[in-house]
Structure formats: structure tokens, C-alpha cells
Image (cartoon, coloured by chain):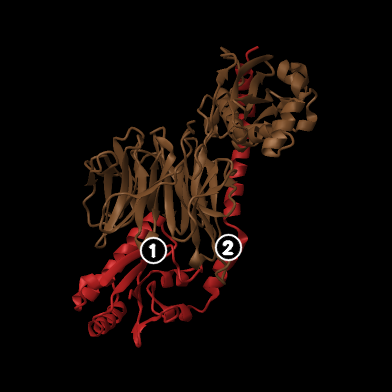
Chain colours: A brown, B red
Amino acid sequence: MKKNLFLIIIFYVILKPSISFSLVEIDITRGNLDPMPISVSPFFSDKITDENIKKNLNIENLGQEISKVIENNLEKTGLFDAIEKEAFLQKPDIAHLKPRFEDWALIKSQVLITGKVTSKKINEKDYINIEFKLWDVLGAKMVDGFSLTTTPRSWRRVGHKISDKVYERLTGESGYFDTRIIYVAEEGPKTQRIKKLALMDQDGFNTKYITLGSELVLTPRFNPANDKEITYMSYFRNMPRVYIVNLQTGEQKVVGDFRGMTFAPRFSPDGKKLIMSLAKDGNSEIWVRNLETNIQEKLTDHPSIDTSPSYSPDGKYITFNSDRSGYQQIYVMRSDGSKVKRISFGKGIYGTPVWSPRGDLIAFTKLHKGKFFIGVMRTDGSGERLLTENYYQEAPSWSPNGRIIIFYRETKTDDKGQGFSAKLWSIDLTGYNERLVNTETDASDPSWSSLLGN
Amino acid sequence: MNISKILKNAFLIVIFGLLVTACATKKSVKTTTESTSTTKAEETQKADPIEKLDALMQGDVYIGSDTVGELASGVPDRVFFATNETILTTASRETLRKQAAWLRQNSNVTVVVEGHADERGTREYNLALGERRANAAKDYLMTYGVSSDRIKVLSYGKERPVDSGSNPLSWSKNRRSVTVKAN
């Protein structure tokens, strides 16, 4: 893998730290059904910049493309409604300097985003500077903005950073656009699926394949403390084991020295430990391995199947599923394995518990009366809420701000066994805004990264 | 001008509208998931002569011969399980005794017992379940005189179905452990 895969930010200048409290706000806890009208003006650029960018990236109008990235991100939240650019009355360059607010109010825009792209040379190398401003149309003032200088090919990430800023400003929640998703790309017939690890930007762009498909790979998961590291399970040499991969160097190592199959890996919130299951002699237990001291320890001790462990964000607890009651149910224990307590008592079987990054909820898969559900419950098992129902779906993973759950869904085949597909879907914590997540191939086992570092 | 106040008022006014749309959205989600094509498929499944299914499944354990290969001549290579179960049926034990007898006669052969689950479970749980099933078969082979160092266990969970159907009969063929020659 190439180095410098990630964005180099040289300047990060906040233009005007604003003190506005009157800015339009969105309450995202109710499942907003009345999206806020918003205008994203194409970012403006001069002739020299256009020529340089054409040379570097082969893109005609980068300013327009950046505005599309932002529009697409914001619209997919279901909270915003981007106004058609044909309706805009003001030119991008003038709007960016000082919008005529009446013109934007006239087309019912409550919020306006403007920007400017400038090419730069630093030590003979090409860079672009992207400046953006967020305007409150009704309040008639600028409320936020920044300016970033970066390598030309990182332009989409700047679009995501701008989207995050706008989202944070308007909802009061942290953003989730400058993130990636690691998943399993699938191809081929259901009985001989070829699976590869794949990495993409949250909006489905910049897909990279991490493995070639020569061995079966499953359940990749990001290290929440390091977005350049993942863990996953591979059948390399027909020895199903848990691995850790550095996405920058491509370096890969098997985790621990276990006799038996290791699977269902997840990092601790600080990235210093890995929890997983070890299946040996017909019994699966949960183990933890300290990645710094290389000490490994068994946490559960029960003849039943104990698997799918996930840490609470403070690292003090672990939730997992076990069939010790006869059927798969969700349990919580202290991270040293003590005080095991069952928390799921509803009808049906429960699996794949994943602790929310906010700490207050656990997402899960439920099978009841032949249907699969993705749901959430409080960490004591109360307040169960089912978000979506389908023939088959599982493996919830949280967006870093804990507002959205991504999972995968498989279709039922017809009576000839045809028509199988697996796709990623996302849904709001509110149960609204269910969306297909675009992937180049069929896909499963998604894991959402934290907000990317530099 | 205080926009958030105006917004809040506007919110109160539209709240009824929101609720109505909310209900509408929920309903439409339900109807799309319960698509008509699936219901039709289910009906044709049920319309299948029940006797035929009975001949292929006992309880929900597969007892037919479709997909069954041979470890050696006259020695079936696989056994089948009930949903979520790892218990060996009478028929499974008979198959495994045949495998054990053949392995005792061919003491240079080593095998891999591959454990599988159907698609109606979560991936990680199914990996564990496949491992449990393969070990149930391995333990039985050991009881009948095959030493443990000749038997490796490999769980595929739900990753390698033999039948791609989405119906109880297909699932029953996929809940299996298969004894495969390793050398």
C-alpha cells in the first residue's frame, strides 16, 4: 500500500470564530421529516486554478464537484433538502464574497454554503486551497467557515470536512462524513462466494481492495483509536484466524498463538486490546489479548457458545451473545469477565450486540418468527426498539457520532435458488431514513471508522 | 430575528403533519419488505406436496441423498443436523460408524471434518455452531477408534452452503458436517 494515502493538511485556519446562537437549528432526535432547505453554491475558482486542476486531476470544474460532495452528504442525512442550482440568482464568486441575502431568501433557502478553490505551489509541488463559508440567510450573516490547503487528490476529503462542519453547526452533533467504511466485497454464486476486504469513503467513493479474494475473509473492524488499522478474520491456509492489518503499510499479523479457530474480533476503545472468540473442542469462549504486553486471557467459562463481543466506550464492560440459556441472547459483563448478566428477554433470539459510541445503547440483530430485525436497547436491556425488519439482515455498526447504524442485508432466493444479493444499508437511530449504501460489488460486514485523523 | 424561535413555532404547527407522514412512512416500509414476490414464493413452497418434504426431512433434519457424496465406496461423507442443534441423529451415528470403520482400515488417511450452518443465523454465531457440529462428528469418530490426530476440524459457519435455496429443505441440506480426505 502507498504511503501518504491520507490527507496532508498544511493549514487549518478558522476564518471567523463566530458567536452566533440564532442560527437555524435542527433537532435530529425526532426523525426529521421536514428537511431544511439549503443552497450549496458551486465553489468558485479562477482560470489558472482551473488549468492546474485539469492537469492534476483531469477534472473540469472542481468547485462544482466539491459542492456536489457536500450536497450529497447533507441530503443523505434526510435533514436537508438541497435547492437546485438552476434556481440560484447570484454568481458563486460574488455570493462567496458577500451574498445578497434577499436573493437566497427568495428561493426559500435558509442556509447558504459558498466556497473558493485556489491552486498553489509550495516547494514546487501542487496544492489546492479550499475556503468555505456558511451563511445564515435569514440572520443575514456568516456563521462559520474555514480554509484548508491540501494535495489536489484529497479534494473529496475537504468536501467531507466541510459537510461535517455544516452538520455540526446546524445539528449540534459531531459529524461523520470524513470517515471510511471497511467491508467485505462479495462476488460469485451463493455456494462459492468470493470475498475480499474493501475500503471506501463513507459516501461510496475511492474503493480500494485490501485482499485479492484467494481466501475467505470475514468481519473486518476498524480500530476506533487508529483509522489506519483494522482487524478481521481470514481462512489463510485453511486456518481460520484473527489478523490485524495496517492499512498504510499493508503489514499484516496473526493475533495471538491459539490452538483452534479465532474469530469475531473487535478492538477496545483505546485500541490497546483485542477481544475475540476462540473455538476449540466444540466450545467457544471470549478471550482478550493485550496488544502491548501480548498477554491473553480467557474471559468467559461456559460450555455454551459465547461470541460477538463488543466493548463499552469507556472500556469497562463487554457485551456479547451466548446461548447458555438455550438460545442466543445478549449479555453484559465487566471487562475482566466478572458479573455476567443477561439483558435481552424479549421474544426471539438476539445476537451481534454492539455498544454505541455514546455508551447509552446497544445495537443488535434479532430473529423472531422467521424475520430478522436490527434494533437498539438500553444497556440494561430496557427500551428495546426495532428499527428495521427484513428476510435477512445483521451486523450493525455505528457511525462515530452514534446517530446512524450501518448493516448488511441478504435477499431471499427464488425457487430455483437464484436472485441472491448482499448489500449494505444504513438507518437512522430514529428508525427513519433507511438507505442503500452504494458499493461497487455485493457487500457485507460493514464497519464504520472514527472521524479520520490527518 | 430569532430564527430558532420561529422554527420552534413552525415545528409545533407541522407536528401533526409530521405524525401523519411518520405513520405513512412506517407503513410503506413494511409493505415493501413484505413484497408480493416473496409471499408468492412462500405459497409455492407450501403448495409442494407435503409427503415429498416428509420423505426428505425428519423433524427438520435432512434424510435425503441429494448432495451426499462418498468418503469411500459405500461410506457417505456427511451427516445432517436439526436447526441450532449439534446432536447426532441415529442415521448420523450410523454414517459416522461406517466412516470410522473405513478409517480404521485405512490408517494412513487423515481427514478434515468441515462443520456448516444454514443461513438463518448471525455469521459469528454460525462459525461457532459449525465448529461445535464438526466436533460432535469428530468425537463420535474417536469413540469408534479413530485417533484424534487424524481428524482436523474446520468450521465454515454459513459461508459454504451446498444449496442456495431460501427454504426449509435447502437449509436442512446446509446444516451438516462433511468428512473430507486431507491427504
Rendered view: A405 above or below A301 = above
What number is the disc on residue A312? Answer: none
Distance between mark 1 and mark 2 Cα atoms: 28 Å
Count of marks placed on residues: 2
**Residue drawn 35% across and 52% down?**
A242
Residue B118 placement (x, y as % from top left):
42, 65
Residue A291 placement (x, y as % from top left):
30, 41
Rendered view: A211 above or below A81 = below
Q: Earlier in the sequence, mark 1 or mark 2?
A: 2
Nearest the eye: A95 or A49: A49
In this rendering, position of residue A324 left or right of residue A100: left
In the figure, residue A97 lies in which quadrant? top right
Disc 2 is placed on an element classified as: helix
Identify the subunit bearing mark 1. Answer: B
Would you name the residue on which mark 1 appears? Answer: B156
Residue A137 placement (x, y as % from top left):
69, 18
Identify the subunit bearing mark 2. Answer: B
Q: Name the residue at the front extreme.
A: A124
**Residue drawn 30% across and 75% down?**
B89
Would you name the residue on which mark 2 appears? Answer: B38
Crowdedness of circle 1 by 10 Å Cα count: few (<14), some, many (20+)?
many
As shown in the figure, which amino acid type bears the numbered disc 1?
A: Tyr
As shown in the figure, which amino acid type bears the numbered disc 2?
A: Thr
Disc 1 is placed on an element classified as: strand
Between marks 1 and 2 in the image, the one whose residue lies nearer the viewer? 1
**Residue drawn 67% across and 36% down?**
A56
